[in-house]
Image: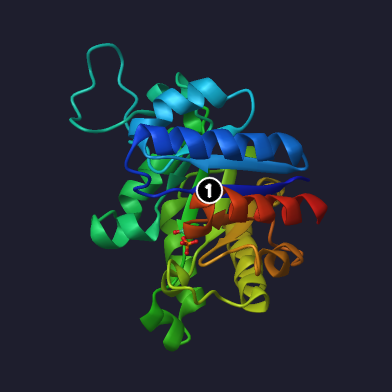
Amino acid sequence: MKKLIVANWKMNPQTHGEAERLASAVSKLALKFKGVETVLCLPFVWLADLSQKYADKIEFGSQDVFWENPSAGGGAFTGEISPAMLKNSKVKYAIIGHSERRRHLGETDEMINKKVRAALKNGLRAILCVGETFQEHKKGATQFALRRQLRKDLEGISKFRDRLAVAYEPVWAIGTGVPETPQNAEAAAMFIRSEISKLMPRRVAGGVRIIYGGSVNSRNIGGYLAMPSISGALVGGASLDAKDFGKILKIANNV
Ligand code: PGA
């Protein structure tokens, strides 16, 4: 199966011109490295335009999605974006439950569960982010944190195996330049697989892809992709530089 490499641009860049230059450069690379499923997750304001312009070259994703998919005239949710709006803009994926939203914007597991359900039900592919905080990591409570999140975030989801991915993202490794080791990330990925096998039929759980995120770059990506339970990566900072991101795609293409 192709490796899944997801670029999370977060709240970058600040102009449409820069966003288009980056999307255009990366989409050329994606055409070259066809053995990789490359997904660009852009801020909404650039996403709608660029996903429609470049959808034949590369996949696009949002960094969030709302849980309501209103019928005509029912969209009384100021500021939110529905699954249908994304689908209708050629967006295929949605990152859901990123730790920056959990920590800074008060996103709860209940909200995340509603978003994952709505995304999957409405034909999007969901990339659910889970991971322990630094305190949990230090206390040896990583598995406890993962179990708590997975049970709540995936409650009631028993199908859509090909459309669900889980990103293991230790909170302390995000944007810090201090990644988790490939061996520990593999152990967490194996634990995630065993937990989701308890939450949904084994056949369904087996089709869920598990990827790693947290300070991934072109120098360390190879280590994660060599792990049997890790099917790809969620890349933040290093995805904003087409050259560096291109190196990541090249390595993923050759695995
Ligand atoms: P990072 O971000 O690669 O900059 O650590 C990853 C993420 O937040 O998804």
In percent of the image, x 46 and y 32: which residue is there? Answer: 20
**View extreme (right): residue:** 254
Q: How is the image coloured?
A: rainbow
| Closer to us: 12 or 183 | 12
Q: Is mark 1 within 8 Å of ligand 1?
A: no
Quadrant position of the C terminus in the picture: bottom right
Q: Which class describes the residues within 10 Å of circle 1: few (<14), some (14-19), or many (20+)?
A: many
**View extreme (bottom): residue:** 139
Residue 231 pos. (x, y %): 69, 55
Q: Is residue 156 left or right of residue 204?
A: left
State which quadrant residue 15 falls in: top left
Label 1 element class: strand
Placement of 44 over or under 107, stated as above or below: above
Residue 44 pos. (x, y %): 36, 34
| Res 198 visible | yes
Q: Is residue 10 left or right of residue 229?
A: left
| Kind of residue at disc 1 | Ala
| Res 93 visible | no
Q: Which residue is mark 1?
A: 7
Residue 145 pos. (x, y %): 44, 72
Q: Is residue 176 left or right of residue 184?
A: left
| Closer to us: 181 or 149 | 181
Placement of 217 over or under 71, stated as above or below: below
In percent of the image, x 35 and y 28: which residue is there? Answer: 82
Placement of 93 over or under 95, stated as above or below: above
In percent of the image, x 64 and y 64: which residue is there? Answer: 194
